[in-house]
Amino acid sequence: MLIKKPSDIRPSEITSQENYLNRRDFIRAGAIAGGALLAPGAFGALIPEARRAKLDGVTESPFSTTETPNSYDDITTYNNFYEFGTGKNDPVVNARDFKPRPWTITVEGEAEKTGTFEFDDFMKPFDLEERIYRMRCVEAWSMVIPWVGISLADVIKHVQPTSRAKYVAFETLNDPERMPGVRRRVLEWPYREGLTIEEATNPLPILAVGLYGEVLPNQNGAPMRLVVPWKYGFKGIKSIVKIHFSERRPKTSWNMSQPSEYGFYANVNPEVDHPRWSQARERRIGASLFASKQPTLMFNGYGEQVADLYKGLNLTRNF
Ligand SMILES: Nc1nc2c(c(=O)[nH]1)N[C@H]1C(S)=C(S)[C@@H](COP(=O)(O)O)O[C@H]1N2
Ligand SMILES: [Mo]
């Protein structure tokens, strides 16, 4: 079993959830007593700025995998983030001095609560959860990552898409001053990604703001990036500045760049090969050099949660 169902949650996890809730009640009571001492919004997610700062009030998610996470070092030194260079070891070096503040998130298109929000204000209504998810890159390697994030479905519910919203699109910051990689046209900037509204409101996707209980490192997409665990890693767009709701399918970066190799859906599927290599097996980063590749699971092992989204869809044609 790879994913815990709510019925499998260990008592220790329930206890920690209860402690957390008690703690929140406590903070609430203190806030009433202490009045103006607490900033407005102190009940919601507060993301500190400092590098590697601890995140407060994080609950454990029942959606986590029970697999052992990769090391902090693996997760933060072997990255894809073309805005900071195309080599796996480039982002950790080139994003070191990137400042993910001040930061705004623009919500636009087919939704009721559109506008441009300071990052802190954007985060306030939501709860922070740790979710340990498997990530499978299209390059046939994988990692297990203890993200901290907010539920994308919660965000979408909050901004109230109109009935015309069939897709949600995301864009990364496009700033050649702060991101040396965008001075080269290796992709058409800004980096773009998108999901159907059904995919985006599934309980699994998160907007991650942390890693190993700490603030998200720049090279992993600070201050906020998408994580969609049943899709190839390139759907997990980093350093998001825009969320757009639309009736029509949005353009996505890798599909624009090489449409025959990268589709819109990008669901992890061991049966549909990349045109230049097999997708049947994966190499777990950090495993012994002598370890053999492991078989890749349909939907990265999240089929029980997401297979219904694609009923009747030809997954070979819609790759
Ligand atoms: N803006 C942006 N987001 C991006 C990328 C990128 O180059 N630019 N690379 C993607 C790819 S291919 C992968 S595998 C994951 C890697 O995430 P990680 O470095 O946090 O492991 O980020 C995705 N998000
Ligand atoms: Mo990737």
Image (cartoon, grey):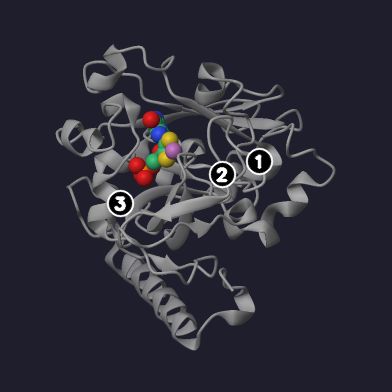
Quarter of the image holding residue 67? bottom left
Q: Mark 2 points at which residue?
A: 279
Q: Is residue 83 above or below residue 49?
A: above
Of marks 2 and 3, which one's residue comes earlier in the chain?
Answer: 3
Q: Report the disc number at residue 307.
A: none
- The quadrant of the image that shows the C terminus is top right
Of marks 3 and 1, which one's residue comes earlier in the chain?
Answer: 3
Confirm if mark 3 falls within 8 A of ligand 1: yes
Residue in the picture at 22% in, 54% down: 73
Residue in the picture at 24% in, 50% down: 48
> Seen in the image, is 96 located left or right of residue 294?
left
> Seen in the image, is 301 located left or right of residue 313?
left
> Seen in the image, is 9 located left or right of residue 191?
right
Ligand 1 is found in the corner quadrant, namely top left
Q: Which of 239 and 15 is in front in this view?
A: 239
Q: In this view, does 181 lie above or below 272?
A: above
Q: Where is residue 168 in the image (x, y as percent from the top left)?
A: 61, 32
Q: Mark 1 points at which residue?
A: 272
Which residue type does callout 1 highlight? Val
Q: Distance between the residues labelled 3 and 1?
A: 27 Å
Which residue type does callout 3 highlight? Ile
